[in-house]
Amino acid sequence: MRIAIINISDAGLTAAPTLQQQLQAIPLCRDAVAAHWHDYDAFIFIGAMGICVRTIASLVEDKHTDPAVVCVDTQCQHVVSVLSGHVGGANDLTRDVAAILGATPVITTLSDNAGLWALDTLAQRFGWSCPCTQLNPYIIPFVNQEPTALLLDIRDRGTDYLERTLPSHVTLVSAIEAITPDRFKLAIIVSPYIYPNSHAFGGSPAKIPTLQYFPRILTLGIGLAHQASRVQGIITDFHHHLEAQNLSPLAIRHYATINLKADEPVVKQLQADGQEVLFFTADQLNEVEVPTPSDTVAQHVGTPSVSEAAALLASNHGTLLIPKQKSTDKDYTLAVAIDNQYLRHGHIEIVGAGPGDPDLVSVRGRMMLEKADLILYAGSLVPKALTDCHKPGAVVKSSADMNLEEQCTLMKEHYDQGHFIVRLHTGDPCIFGAIQEQMAFFDQHGMSYHITPGISSFLAAAAELRSQFTIPERTQTIILTRGEGRTPMPEKEQLHLLAKSQSTMCIFLSAAIVDDVQRELLQEYPEDTPVAACYHLTWPDQHIYRGKLKDLAKIVHDHNLTLTTMLVVGEAIDNRQGLSELYNKYFTHLFRKGE
């Protein structure tokens, strides 16, 4: 934001420089506000509210065009959102300024104070289109918490937010037929499909106000005749093809075509209209399988498909919503696709649970757990408390007594119902997470999945040991490995070979074979090398036992430690020696002589 600061009190002598630095704001005198009213996105007044109001009173026109105005009181105790709270960003700026000054934000907008969505900023926030310019007929019943239906035809960052923060008076529905006047006074829809703004839902003559947002998620692949002359007519035809399938032109994300058409008049006009156009080579398009290839197209441009292949490529090999369409004038072809990530089909999120403490799961991981329809967690390794945040009605099951086939069958059953599934693994799932076989199953069945990383137990070990595992001039390498038990180790990764570097070594899943582990490590590490056996890291029953390498096996046996034990070996454990010397060696140039 372009921000101006108007200092009208002595308090501003302290606050203004801080805000200028933190917000990259420009100082401005009060008399210059009128002349620069539309040159800045926001004005911050430091002083009395009355002076602020009198300064801007004659300048206020419309919340959609007025800049944000914030006022900081003379004691810098309160920051007040004065003008353009939602649309202009004054509410967010108020929170930012208050955080910088350690003040209290004062926001009077009803939706903010009630914890409700700001309907007038959702489109801008999530990159949606909203053709409605007068939102008060929808905002009023919404903030008054009238029964509201929410219909989501797609999944994106914005719809995830709506589902995660669903107010108590809003009901998520799966079909338009469920929105009936006897149940709802307002409908909110997020969809690329066209629904009437006012609709007689359920066959009733009563009409429900309907606010619709169009997410920009459609890709239009286009093929063009050379120097096609009816430029605007062709672009209008594009829109008509969408509308014929009840898809809105407002949902267009970008166009795509072959790079040979970069200078065509239609392409130039689309770009002039602010549309993004992506270009692909004939070789790239040639690699895409399409339903309607053309030998004629191949003869002219070197690939059997332009419109369909370009649409699929630009949508990350998504789904065709409209296959190739030809114009009656034979001057273009059109195909429409959507990236599969936006479809509300089943999805599996493999989530790293972290080392055990529910507070150590990532923010993203927590969000995944909160919206999951099925949580399948590794019960022998993951505390059930991590799943306590599940939404009402979610299925929560431990996989401890299930084999791989049973786990995959359960996940596919839910996937085929369009459910969101979380497969919860301990630590980070990519480190001894046993996810390879599951991903092979997902790939075999064409299932959508993604991995959310987690905090590994070796990081928890460093934290709980209060140790830095890399020590300057001592060890700069951390080895993550396991001993050779039922799972054979590659010959080149035998422990005694890895131990040659005497790096910090974190050994997973090896407490049961600790005698073998100790014997191999002693081939390279000195017997007095520090070790730690870390049991149930960050769990309520966590225990950490320190000692020397020569006593590692005894430590594990004496305390009956199990597979959920991390073994750490290396001189980095509890190392505090030599750090001041190293610091002085490398940073003495920062200090003046004598200080």
Image: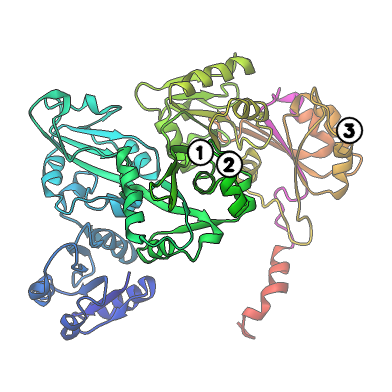
Q: Is residue 385 left or right of residue 10?
A: right
Tag 1 or tag 2, which sits nearer the N-term?
1
Mark 3, Cα crowd under 10 Å, few <14 / some 14-19 / many 20+, is some
- Looking at the rendered structure, the kind of residue marked 1 is Val
Q: Which residue sits at x=52%, y=21%?
A: 411
SS class of the residue under badge 2? loop
**Mark 2 crowd level (few <14, some 14–19, many ≥20, 10 Å Cα):** some
Q: Which residue is mark 1?
A: 361
Residue 188 x, y percent position in the rendering: 23, 38
**Which residue of the protein is positioned furthest toward the front in this rendering?**
329
- Of 488 and 420, nearer the camera is 420
Q: Quadrant of the C terminus?
A: bottom right
Q: What residue did someone put label 2 on? A: 455
Which mark is in front, 3 or 1? 1
Left or right for 71, reference 298: left
Say whether disc 3 or disc 1 marks the residue closer to the N-terminus: 1
Asked if the residues shown at circle 2 and circle 1 are in contact, with their CB atoms under 8 angstroms apart, the answer is yes
| Vertical placement of residue 270 versus 542, above or below | below
Label 3, on which residue? 519
Judge whether residue 569 is colored magenta. Answer: yes
Classify mark 1: helix, strand or loop. Answer: loop
